Amino acid sequence: MINVTIKTNLNIYKTTCQKNTPLKDLIKSLNINFIFPCGCSERCFNCKVKYINNAPNPSKLETIKLKNIELEEGIRLACCSYITEDVKIELNEIEYSNFIDI
């Protein structure tokens, strides 16, 4: 099992997962309030997260859409990133109070 720590502006989540678990699935399973603007269809490129350590190799899409400096700093897209080894990740979690109830 792989150890995963996800640090947000609101919480710290610690869990384990299998190798090659999609990050988007892990975020959803932990009920982290993270926005995937295009519904994980890999079209908007706004679901950026930062790997503090052990960032996976960027996908072809990430190498096209992200700046080289972002890739070097461990920035990846949550919609197309897979957990391959023990990692620490930072992302912005949305507070419920920011949602509008219609």
Image (cartoon, grey):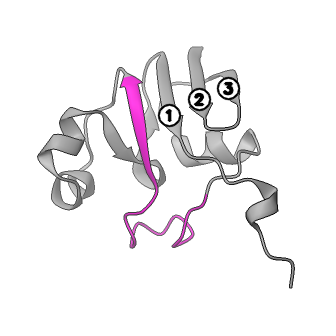
Residue 12 spot, x, y in % from top left: 67, 26
User: Where does the N terminus fall, quadrant-wise?
Assistant: top right
Kind of residue at disc 1? Glu
Q: Give the magenta range.
A: 35-52
Seen in the image, is 70 located left or right of residue 92? left
Instruction: Report the Cα–Cα distance between label 2 and label 1.
Output: 5 Å
Label 3 vs 2, first from the N-terminus:
2
Q: Is residue 4 left or right of residue 59?
A: right
Q: Please say if 39 is above or below 78.
A: below
Q: Are marks 3 and 2 in contact (CB under 8 Å)?
A: yes
Q: Which mark is residue 90?
A: 1
Towards the viewer: 55 or 33: 33
| Amino acid type shown at disc 3 | Ile
Q: Residues within 10 Å of mark 1 (few under 14, many from 20)?
A: some
Of all residues, the one furthest to the bottom in this rendering is 102
Residue 39 horizontal/vertical position (percent):
57, 69
Label 2 Cα crowd, 10 Å radius (few <14 / some 14-19 / many 20+)? some
Are dots 2 and 1 in contact, CB under 8 Å? yes
As measured in the structure, the alpha-carbon distance from the residue carrying label 1 to the one carrying label 3 is: 9 Å
Residue found at x 32% / y 41%? 75
Residue displayed at 44% across by 38% down: 82
Give how far across and how far down residue 31 sits, in percent. Answer: 77, 45
Depicted 32 relative to depicted 2: above or below: below
Q: Which residue is mark 3?
A: 12
| Image location of residue 89, percent across then percent down | 49, 30
- Element on which disc 2 rests: strand
Main SS of the magenta part reads loop
Badge number at residue 7: 2
Q: Say whether residue 17 is magenta.
A: no
Q: Residues within 10 Å of mark 3 (few under 14, many from 20)?
A: few
Q: Is residue 96 above or below residue 10?
A: below
